[in-house]
Image (spheres, rainbow, N blue to C red):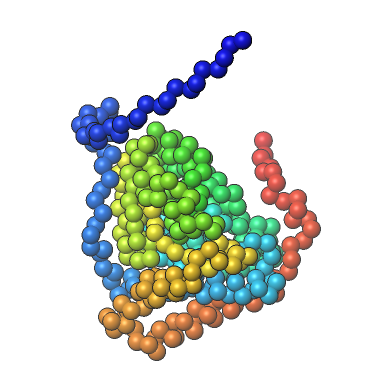
Amino acid sequence: MATKKAAPKKPAVKKPAAKKPSSRSTTKKAATRKKSPQNQPNVPAFSADEDLEAYKVMLTIRRFEEKAGQMYGMGLIGGFCHLYIGQEAVVVGVQMASEEGDQMITGYRDHGHMIAMGLDPRGVMAELTGREGGLSRGKGGSMHMFSTEKHFYGGHGIVGAQVSLGTGLAFANRYYDNGNVSFVYFGDGAANQGQVYESFNMAELWELPVVYVIENNQYAMGTAISRASAQTDLSKRGVSFNIPGEQVDGMDVRAVRDAAARAAKSCRDGNGPFILEMNTYRYRGHSMSDPAKYRAREEVNRMREEHDPIEQVKARLLKSKTVNEAGLKEIDAEVRAIVTDAANFAQESPEPDASELWTDIIEEVSA
């Protein structure tokens, strides 16, 4: 009878010496374009008007989300509800860098994105409550909203699904040569999805005008990024596809606007995709059903006290004497009135008629 041979011992593996990067490049394109621009050490200052604009929009998002959380607790919003509190500087800064016709697409933490793009808070809140006056006529809810008029293509409930769709929007931009850029938002959790890398590959092959905005809020659903990702510098996720990336302070709206403007210009100049990792932080749990016990309260308080995006702008406005404390209170009152009106509209709007079940299923095309 044949006997089993003892498994050979594994030879000791020597760690290879670090190789110097090759100066050769396979194509002229790789040699000339694929250097990531240097991060600017000094963030360009905002004018008084820019600070005021950013403050008003971020505050509107913050107050809207606070009201949405309150309404969820009252049972007026069903299903899932993912709040954007703490991350406001990301979408506001990017939107300040965008141009008319640029598209935006994101995941299910989407209320702030719509408000930043100028959608009516009434329509957003009515959709959260599943009412007829909602952006999707009450059929989409918190996780599924869109507006072709404002070039906002969702709100998507499937993790990472928006990345391939947003890449398709960029393909259309290149096909029509319209000069527009697709801004594709996804989180640190979605950054590990396979379809993300398929999209990266195609975007680079076709030199598509797309900026991938990774909103790294450090915890995905509830696991710290250091425990879920082997490479925690998400700006490097495009290295194997030759896509440049940059890390950005996502709590500083000025840094976000600056980085987004440079990335968008690179796309418009025909240089293909770009990755921006926005290091940000959400104050609430992943969703309203998440008690967020996986992090210390002291950590959240420290972020609020030392890095809050709205408080940073508020301090600059006061220091520059653009507004005083009384003026800030007046702005807050105006914002709260807008949000209260949206909440009232959402509760007074009727539920969608049963006939809506049969709409938006197929598109009738005339011969």
Q: Identify the image quadrant of residue 89.
A: bottom left
Q: Residue at x 38, y 62 (%)?
A: 250
Q: Identify the image quadrant of residue 23.
A: top left
Does the rendering let one see residue 166? Answer: no
Q: Position of residue 240 (x, y in %)?
A: 37, 36
Q: Residue at x 45, y 54 (%)?
A: 225
Task: Give the side of residue 151 with respect to residue 364, left or right.
Answer: left
Q: Residue at x 60, y 52 (%)?
A: 157
Work out whether 119 lies above or below 270.
below
Q: Position of residue 161 (x, y in %)?
A: 55, 46
Q: Position of residue 76 (x, y in %)?
A: 69, 71
Q: Position of residue 300 (x, y in %)?
A: 46, 71
Task: Give the side of residue 163 with respect to residue 249, left or right.
Answer: right
Which quadrant: the C terminus? Answer: top right
Work out whether 165 lies above or below 54.
above
Which quadrant: the N terminus? Answer: top right
Q: Residue at x 25, y 29 (%)?
A: 25
